[in-house]
Amino acid sequence: MDAALQQVNEGQAAIQAAREKLGEAQQSLAAALDGSAHDAVGTAHASLSQADQQLEECFTATLVAVEAAQTYTATL
């Protein structure tokens, strides 16, 4: 169980790092395309925001998994 939880912790760290990189990418995109009203720019921003939201959902799912695992091990 400890090994599995360690792997989850590593996955959580990777998710957080990915979210940080997406945030940086959004800022870079905004700076590079400042003032552009092209539809593709809006689509790019929306896609990055969606990716960030999905990563947040993944992170939350890992928290639920850890809590369930800990609850189970407490009953042993």
Image: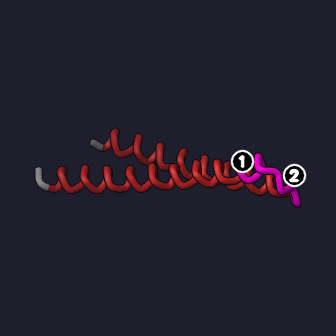
Q: Residue at x 48, y 49 (%)?
A: 12
Q: Nearer the viewer, residue 32 or 65?
A: 32
Left or right: 52 in relation to 34: left
Magenta-highlighted residues: 33-42
Residue 7 location (% of width, % of height): 41, 40
Amino acid type for the residue under numbered disc 1 = Ala
**Residue where numbered disc 1 is placed:** 44
20 or 70, which is in the foreground?
A: 20
Disc 1 or disc 2, which is closer to the eye?
1
Q: Nearer the viewer, residue 8 or 54?
A: 54
Separation of marks 1 and 2 at Cα, in angstroms: 12 Å
Give coordinates of residue 36: x percent, y percent: 86, 55
**Which quadrant holds residue 37?**
bottom right
Q: Which residue is mark 2?
A: 32
Q: What's under tag 2, amino acid-wise?
A: Ala
Going from the N terminus, do you reach mark 1 or mark 2 first?
Answer: 2
